[in-house]
Amino acid sequence: MTDKTMTLHDQVAGLRAFQKSGGLRENAQRRSVLKKLRQALESSHKEILSALDTDLHKCEAEAISCELALLSQMLRTTLATLRSRTRPRRVGAGIFNFGSSARIYPEAYGVALIGGTWNYPILLALEPAIAALSAGNSVLLRLSDTAPASAKVLTAIIEKTGEPNALAATAAPWDIVLAEKFDCIFFTGGERMGKLVMSKAAATLTPVTLELGGKSPCIVTAEADLKAAARRIVWGKFLNAGQTCVAPDYVYVQAQVKDKLTLEIRRAVREFYGDVPQESPDYGRIVSDFHFKRLTLMLAGGRLICGGENDPAERYIAPTVIDMVDWNSPVMQQEIFGPILPVLTFETIEEVIALLAAKPKPLALYLFSSKRAVWRKIAAETSSGGMAINTVVMHLAAEKLPFGGVGASGMGAYHGMAGFAAFTHYKSILIKHLPFDWPFMLPPFSVWKLRILRFLGR
């Protein structure tokens, strides 16, 4: 056994021993850890911004709005609502339990494993960690080695928190991490790794939350506000150089307005990133050589509407829009997860609904339309992890909306109260207060008892 394995094993043992000794059972302890984490984050802003720039060429505005501000909002809300979330709740006990009371007690699962990812390395590691800590769990964060500068900063933040038995981090390989026993697992990443995590968890019947991805469609109907749609699509697609799990993966636009929409998209790209996006301080880079090569292969086929330029030395791929593609094209074979936007056309909304029904369920579905009847139809007749109308990506910032996938795009949800629930076992407790029992519940079952039971069973 290697020292690295021993170190990880010792970490998990320390987290488990802490839980057995009481852990974060009391709200005061949870508040203390969360406040220490907030202080560690606030004192590390410069280091976080530098790390995100190093790993992803992420500009300060994106780093603040898409990572730090969301974490700040979550910490503030979590601390403000902690008491109400953790309070036992009384519920009715039902007619058969006359003379009894029933309560639901939220309790921590125990030791939670959280798998962070590289595209939003600070947010997607700490957001579920905050939820897990608020629920009273000890947390082991598995940090992504694809964003090494961010992983280093996260490790320093966790050390500053000074609660190694409540919150710890590791960069050990997944096979070593998953060899340990956890009480719940929260994983953010791709479908292949999600399947591995779930298969390992199945061996120990460990509950799993999977936040995966998929090809999130963006439907634009003829009566939509095309200028607003184009600006919002361009923002959401090319945010973080397209490396966003809920970015619009492709556009489905009604055929008669396709040319107008693509014209507005080109204008929006130029407005946001200039004539040479490579020179824009606000445009990111691809995280690794592997992903750069994967994405450049997708540029084969189709017709360029704009972009297409790339620079291996910088791992730069321009904001790229292509048309003349179909579902057999390389770019449509898998989730893109990069700054390439295919544009397809449709004639009727029924055609789109039928096609989406035949595809894996996406993490997000976007619709641009001014007709409420179309909103209702798409919402009722399609399935996706989440849906946004006349905007993209921004449903993530609505704290009270659960965020998660369905089918191939994941299982379970978090954000707000859903995040607390993801790391909580709701224990049911029934308390009998009276010495009385219903006679018809007890044998021998006479005719009159059966009559009552038959009546109640109708």
Image (tube, grey):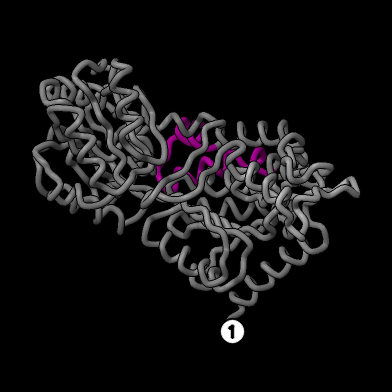
Measuring 18% from the left and 19% from the top, which residue is drawn there? 222
- Residue 42 is covered by the magenta coloring: yes
Measuring 28% from the left and 45% from the top, which residue is drawn there? 316
The residue nearer to you, when weighing 138 against 417, is 417
Measuring 58% from the left and 63% from the top, which residue is drawn there? 170
Report x, y in % for residue 155.
Answer: 61, 55
Does 58 appear above or below 151? above
Q: Amino acid at mark 1?
A: Met
Q: Secondary structure at mark 1?
A: loop
- Residue 196 is covered by the magenta coloring: no
Of helix, strand and loop, which mostly describes the magenta segment?
Answer: helix
Asked whether, in this view, residue 48 is left or right of residue 428, the answer is left
- Magenta-colored span: 40-67
**Image quadrant where residue 276 sits:** top left
Report x, y in % for residue 358.
Answer: 23, 46
Asked whether, in this view, residue 229 is left or right of residue 411, the answer is left
User: Which quadrant of the rendered structure holds the N terminus?
Assistant: bottom right
The residue that mark 1 highlights is 1
Residue 419 visible within the image: yes
The residue nearer to you, when weighing 305 against 408, is 408
Q: Residue furthest right?
A: 435
Residue 173 visible within the image: no
Report x, y in % for residue 415.
Answer: 56, 38
